[in-house]
Image (tube, grey):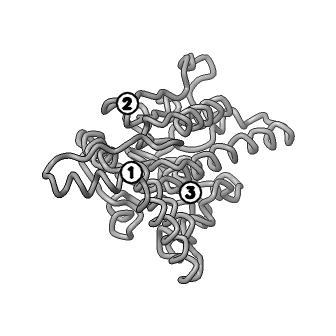
Amino acid sequence: MADNTDDRWKRRNFRPPPPSDVAEPDVPVLVEYVSGGRVALITFNRPHADNAITTELAASLIEILETIAARTTVRVALLTGAGDRAFSIGGDLRQRKNMTKEDWLRQRQVFDRVLYTLRQLRKPIIAAVHGMAYGGGCEIAISSDFIIASEDALFGQPEAAVGLSAGGGSPAFLPRVLPPGKAMQMLMTGEPITAQEAYRLGMVNEVHPRAELMPAVLRIAETIAANSPTAVQAVTRAVRMGDGEPLEQAVAIMMEAHWRSAIHPDRIDGIRAFNEGREPVFQDPDY
């Protein structure tokens, strides 16, 4: 039976694009430094469009991530979306409606830089997801170190429903965070999964009521930020670089990270603080 046009979009909770005369926010991505400047809170700021990703939003996100990478006082980054409906529904199809092939390729280069910059960030990055995380929004979430979600979160890759093959990493990354068969089903059907199913399958670490999402994520971020940033970055790198490698190669990567932390001043003060019954004083990393 043919898919009913109205059902195709309603089933995925899409709403019509906003009128073209709706004013865009002055800043498409917000960044706030909280917890004494040690946590960077990054917010996609196009709630009228369900935080759909335009070329301008993507370029702004790259600039923010590069600033965070160079700001040594920042120890953890958080990603979230403004408004009540969405983390992000991915690429803005209204902006793409009249794109030429050259326009599309130019935007694709910017989008690729977003995902590369995100995945290369040495600092832990957590996705705080509420509402819809579709397409590129879902791909950004699964490119983070882990996801904390609200009860109303939905994760989906609906590209096939609009004639596209997903191109932001989900064919490579989704089968690593979900059973491969489930990942294939999502990519083929374009149908989303709920936060509860994503949690059951291990894609999401925790699920909270909507009002409790950001306090829960901030607690986790502050716990990480209170640890040695050098040690956190070292173990993060060991996990990322070792993923998919043969066991002995993964162990070798781990040991290199371990020895780098073992000779660092944070290790000396951390063990001394334990024996003296006080809080350790961990240094900001050199980079």
Mark yes or no: residue 133 visible.
yes
Label 1 amino acid?
Answer: Pro
Judging by the rendered image, the residue that carries numbered circle 2 is 37
Residue 226 falls left or right of residue 79: left
Callout 2 crowding tier (Cα within 10 Å): few <14, some 14–19, many ≥20? some
- Upstream in the sequence, badge 3 or badge 2? 2
Ranked by sequence position, the earlier of labels 1 and 2 is 2
Distance between the Cα atoms at labels 1 and 3? Answer: 45 Å
Residue position marked by numbered label 1 in the rendering: 265
Badge 2 amino acid: Gly
In front: mark 3 or mark 2?
A: 2
Residue positioned 78% across, 34% down in the render: 98
x, y (%) of residue 266?
36, 51
Q: Which mark is residue 157?
A: 3
The N terminus appears in which quarter of the rendering? bottom right
What residue is drawn where x is 62% and y is 66%? Answer: 172
Q: Is 140 or 76 nearer to us in this picture? A: 76
Give the camera-side residue of 27 and 70.
Answer: 70
Depth check, front residue: 280 or 113: 280
Give how far across and how far down residue 185 sits, in percent: 54, 70
The image position of residue 11, as x and y in percent, is: 47, 53
Residue 81 in the figure: left or right of residue 207: right
Tell which tag, 1 or 3, sits nearer the viewer.
1
Dot placed on the residue nearer the N-terminal end, 1 or 3: 3
Where is residue 142? Give x, y as percent.
Answer: 50, 56
- Which of the image's four quarters has the C terminus? top right
